Amino acid sequence: MTDQAPATESEIPGQTTGDVPGKPTSASRTTLSHIMTHSDTNLLGTVHGGVIMKLVDDAAGAVAGRHSGGPAVTASMDEMAFLEPVRVGDLVHVKAQVNWTGRTSMEVGVRVLAERWNESTPPTQVGSAYLVFTAVDADGKPRTVPPVLPETERDKRRYQEAQIRRTHRLARRRAIMELREKRVAEGHQD
Ligand SMILES: CC(C)(COP(=O)(O)OP(=O)(O)OC[C@H]1O[C@@H](n2cnc3c(N)ncnc32)[C@H](O)[C@@H]1OP(=O)(O)O)[C@@H](O)C(=O)NCCC(=O)NCCS
């Protein structure tokens, strides 16, 4: 993983960022909806967290592919939060958008909402997650992505928050690698 962050926390790309033309957030924003059935449940009778995570990965992958204009693989998924149980008969909406772009990677933010499939009450938020996707070429090597162009104040806030997460991911990874190298140098086997 490269350690280079393309912008400081306060930098939000404008319409003319870099050599590659940017793409607005709304161009790839996507919602995936699915009704939960008995085959989606865990032993407690509510919907299995893994079912929700698959939908999250699917929706985020679609967004990453649309934004980058080609294949993109999940590099990491973090801060997956399950806020409320999801039940059989819930219509689940997984809303995803590109929050931030680096050189070859994108952070996709996902919100998971649920409503009863046959009632007109407003949906409630049941989960959220942040995923990093890396755009890849035919050989699986990282390729450049268009910079995302945040449009609304909410998009801009999400861009700035995503940069904070990016900084923390890199710092955590670097600290762990340094610790491992230090332990090897000290003669520890594992
Ligand atoms: C993701 C993958 C392509 C990265 O390849 P790599 O050789 O490590 O490439 P790099 O180190 O140049 O990283 C490329 C970009 O991905 C980002 N990245 C790589 N690993 C990451 C991780 N674990 N978390 C967050 N970002 C990551 C880097 O920060 C970099 O972003 P940038 O270009 O915007 O700065 C590679 O690890 C891979 O193919 N993993 C398997 C993906 C997969 O199969 N996913 C499905 C899940 S089963």
Image (cartoon, rainbow, N blue to C red):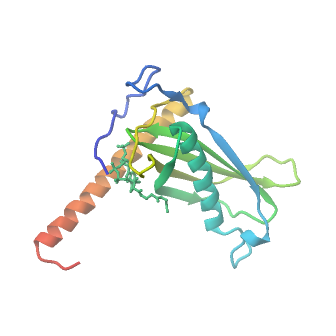
Q: Residue at x 69, y 49 (%)?
A: 32
Where is residue 188? Give x, y as percent: 16, 78
Q: Quadrant of the C terminus?
A: bottom left
Tag count: 0
Q: Is residue 177 left or right of residue 109?
A: left
Where is residue 123? Give x, y as percent: 75, 49
Q: Is residue 147 left or right of residue 46?
A: left
Where is residue 31? Give x, y as percent: 68, 44
Q: As rendered, which of 35 and 122 lies closer to the eye? A: 35
Seen as rendered, the residue at the extreme left is 186
Seen as rendered, the residue at the extreme top is 16
Task: Mark yes or no: residue 135 visible.
Answer: no
Establish if 190 lies above or below 35: below
Q: Is residue 149 left or right of residue 112?
A: left
Establish if 56 lies above or below 62: below
Q: Quadrant of residue 65?
A: top right
Q: Quadrant of residue 87?
A: bottom right
Q: As rendered, which of 112 and 19 lies closer to the eye? A: 19
Q: Residue at x 39, y 43 (%)?
A: 164
